[in-house]
Every structure is written in structure tokens, then in C-alpha cells.
Amino acid sequence: MLLSISHTSTYRYTGPVAYAVQRLRLWPTNCSVQEVVDWRLEITGATSELSYNDAFGNRTELLRATPNTTEIVIHAKGQVDTRDTAGVLGLGGGVPPLWIHQRQTELTEPGEAIRALAEPLGGLTNRLDMLHRLSGEITARVAYVPDSTDVATPAEAALASGSGVCQDHAHIFLSSARLLGVPARYVSGYLLIEGRTEQAATHAWAEAYVEDLGWVGFDVANGVAPDEKYVRIACGLDYGQAAPITGLRSGSATESLAVALNVEQ
């Protein structure tokens, strides 16, 4: 499926910004489930300082704001040809090694709620069945409620509250899978939604490593396996390591963000 994507992030400031940097992970890469046909970034109000591949293989770029700017606009756009593999990416090990993906982070550290969720699944011998059961349990227990959490909400808090968004579903899955001894990673990307081209934000899901299959995707928020409607951008141990854009700034000006995202076939 050939998907066309236009993703614009506009950062506005209430006054001139003396110093600000932003880290971009906005490049889809070729892999078993997708081929990048065309992709480019257009940036105003900032200049590129450094481009590199991070520890997880994500193409990453550092921007420095133009001194005293009051607006930064980042526009990513292009076309990606996707394939439906029932969520299976394959056996490619990639970087870093598998054992790194069993490391918990501040956002995925399990507490009583996650331990209680994962414990009954520990006796299942078929890893793929166990992971599908885990995904289904999370989908049933955590309702999708926009704005009920933020990017700093830990998995344990989201599960305990019973509500969250796609990044929370992914974090709970990662925490539980790692607790069960399964390497797992967070994925950020785009999703084609039937009947709607305009979207409010990028999407997030999880991938877990299954022997003889390799990395397998789980979109816990929607209760499905990623298919040809998904475009992978970046991966990491949690949101912070795979977020499309992160940054910091100095000064007293406050910041607002407007996102315009279109995904269409």
C-alpha cells in the first residue's frame, strides 16, 4: 500500500528564544514491512547541526534554533510503500543486542498492578500466544481516553488508572513483556485511519522478540497486529528514546505546539 504522509509541527514562543535545540527522529527506514519511496524535511526557524544514527539505528538530527526566533516549523513529508506481514518484521537482530530490550526504564518500571497483570501469563509455554493474551488483557483493562495521561506518565500509573493513550498501552505491554523475560521495544510511527486523513498525533505500538519469528508488532491500543496501514519511524526502550521530536530551550518565553498530520493512500 502506497501511503502519503504530511506531518507539520509548529512551535511558537511568546518571545524571542535565545537558545533552543531539538532532536528529530522523523525518518522512516527500509525494512521488511516498508520501503521509503520519497521522504524529505523542510525546516524554518532552525538549522541542522548534526545528523547521525542513534544506538537503536534511528536516523537522528539535531537542530539549533535561529537566535531570537519566535517560531520553528518542522515539516516531514513523503511516500512509503508498506506490506502486510501480520506484524512480523523478521529475525534481523539489529542494534543494540536483544538483552538491552529487557531493561526497564522509569516509564516502564513495573509495580504491583503490572506484576499482577503479568504473573498469570508466566506459565504459558507458547511465547506468541502469551504475548497476544497480554495485549488483549491490556486492551480490556485500559480504555483509550485522549488527554488522560501525558508523555511522562509511567506504565504502572496508567494501568492503575484504567485509562490512557497509545503510548501508555505500549509502555504497559513493554513493562509486562520484560517482566516475563521477553525482549520488547517501543515503536513510533504513522497509522492510516480509515475514513480520516487528518490526525492529531503520531501513533505508537510495541514489538516483542519471538524465537523463530523475530520481532513481532502489537498495536495494543487498537487490539491488532500492525499491517500495511502502519509506517515505522523509530524505536527504543520507551517513548523518550523513540519520540519523533524532543528538545529543550532556555529563557522565559513559553511554548505552544500545533500539529498538522495527514496520512492517506
Image (cartoon, grey):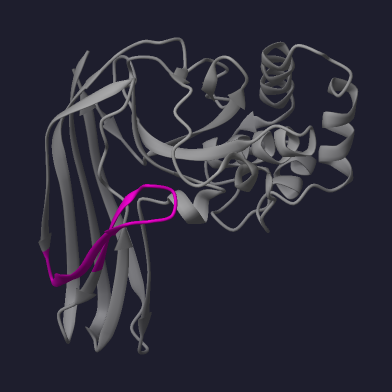
Residue 224 located left or right of residue 33? right
Is 263 situated above or below 82? below
| Residue 237 in magenta stretch | no
Is 89 situated above or below 244? above
Nearer to me, 92 or 226: 92
Q: Position of residue 131 (x, y in %)?
A: 69, 20
Residue 98 located left or right of residue 113? left
In this rendering, the count of numbered labels is: 0
Quarter assignment of residue 248: bottom left
Q: Position of residue 194 (x, y in %)?
A: 32, 14
Residue 105 located left or right of residue 96? right
State which quarter of the image contains the N terminus. Answer: top left
State which quarter of the image contains the C terminus. Answer: top left
* Majority secondary structure in the magenta region: strand
| Residue 51 in magenta stretch | yes
Quarter assignment of residue 71: bottom left
Q: Position of residue 140 (x, y in %)?
A: 71, 21
Quarter assignment of residue 183: top right
Q: Position of residue 55 (x, y in %)?
A: 43, 54
Q: Residue at 64% across / 54% down in the picture?
A: 153
Nearer to me, 8 or 31: 31
Nearer to me, 260 or 78: 78
Is 121 situated above or below 252? above
Nearer to me, 197 or 127: 127
Q: Residue at 56% across / 48% down in the picture?
A: 237
Q: Give the magenta part as a residue range.
A: 44-62
Is 72 situated above or below 19? above
Q: Residue at 53% across / 46% down in the picture?
A: 147
